[in-house]
Image (tube, rainbow, N blue to C red):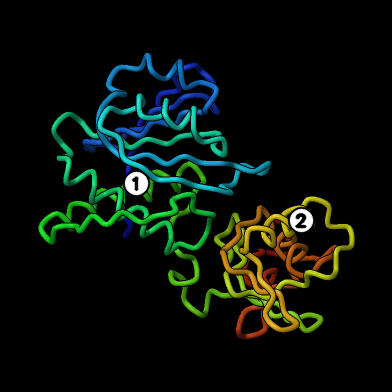
């Protein structure tokens, strides 16, 4: 049986998409979600100058991460002033700050290095960290760092940002595929979102009625997240879509019904596996 978790959230300016602070029950770490235009307002919050690590995020039009940067801070939100002047790509910061004396300087450096490695391994987003920290994590600190990162990963997921590698975290029985028109693509469905997995093939030459997906494809091609291999175009990252049909439209290049397009290893459609009595989900 899964362990229950309790989160306390404060909406500091009374808006669901404004400044938020999040605290898990019994945790010694507080999360701050700060939209870039509200950075000056966030500085007024008590305790926001503590040490920790942070994520700078560029969300696209669907509120999904397109780019990400991870860093450490020893003086909390004040560190973001430098990035506000020097980095244009981000529109939101998520800071994980510890209670006083909870994080040593070694712990912060180790946590930053660990988080960057995990973000690269997830293969979900374009990383703006061009150099991996050379910090070597002490074997005695590693269990604590892993525990803290698990909490960070959980909090990020509650905000809609998955940090794991979907391809490595699913069983083959959970994978759905489409093989139409010589295209082979794979994905997973969690009952809410559909993820197209890395190494899926994309029918890049068919662009009928795709609209925003055409732009998304062009952006992915431009930054090397879709590459040509022979006569195939291969996706090198995992992408998340709001619907199974959005995922199959993106992959196949036209108007599709994802509920019947995606099938598991036994040939059962997503509709057969997840829908009940034919109702729309």
Quadrant in the picture for the C terminus: bottom right
Q: Nearer the viewer, residue 6 or 224?
A: 224
Q: Which residue is mark 2?
A: 213
Which residue is found at the position 44% from the left and 53% from the top? 130
Q: Is residue 171 visible?
A: yes
Image vertical order of residue 158 relative to residue 266, above or below: above
Q: Nearer the viewer, residue 39 or 255?
A: 39
Residue 251 place in picture, x, y as percent: 73, 68
- Mark 1 neighbour density, 10 Å: few (under 14) some (14–19) many (20 or more): many
The number of callouts visible is 2
Image vertical order of residue 223 relative to residue 49, above or below: below
Residue 207 place in picture, x, y as percent: 85, 63
First along the sequence among labels 1 and 2: 1
Q: Is residue 233 left or right of residue 42?
A: right
Quadrant in the picture for the N terminus: bottom left
Q: Which mark is residue 152?
A: 1
Q: Is residue 66 left or right of residue 214?
A: left
Residue found at the very far left of the displayed protein: 140
């Amino acid at each position: 049986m899964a362990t229950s978790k309790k989160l306390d959230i404060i909406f500091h300016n009374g808006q669901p998409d404004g400044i938020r602070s999040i605290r898990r029950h019994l945790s010694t770490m507080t999360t701050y979600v700060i939209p870039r235009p509200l950075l000056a307002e966030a500085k007024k919050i008590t305790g926001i100058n503590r040490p920790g690590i942070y994520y700078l995020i560029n969300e696209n039009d669907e509120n999904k991460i397109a780019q990400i940067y991870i860093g450490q801070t020893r003086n909390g939100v004040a560190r973001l002033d430098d990035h506000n002047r020097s980095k244009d790509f981000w529109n939101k910061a998520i800071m994980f700050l510890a209670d006083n004396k909870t994080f040593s300087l070694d712990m912060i450096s180790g946590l930053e290095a660990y988080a960057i490695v995990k973000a690269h391994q997830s293969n979900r987003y374009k990383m703006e960290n061009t150099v991996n920290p050379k910090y070597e994590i002490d074997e005695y600190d590693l269990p604590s760092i892993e525990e803290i990162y698990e909490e960070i990963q959980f909090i990020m997921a509650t905000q809609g940002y998955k940090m794991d590698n979907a391809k490595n975290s699913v069983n083959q029985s959970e994978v759905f595929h489409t093989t139409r028109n010589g295209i082979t693509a794979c994905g997973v469905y969690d009952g809410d979102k559909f993820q197209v997995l890395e190494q899926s093939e994309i029918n890049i030459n068919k662009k009928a009625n795709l609209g925003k997906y055409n732009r998304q494809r062009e952006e992915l091609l431009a930054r090397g997240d879709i590459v040509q291999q022979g006569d195939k175009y291969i996706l090198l990252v995992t992408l998340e879509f709001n619907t199974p049909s959005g995922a199959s439209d993106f992959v196949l290049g036209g108007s599709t019904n994802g509920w019947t397009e995606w099938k598991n290893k036994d040939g059962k459609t997503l509709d057969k596996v997840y829908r009940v009595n034919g109702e729309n989900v």
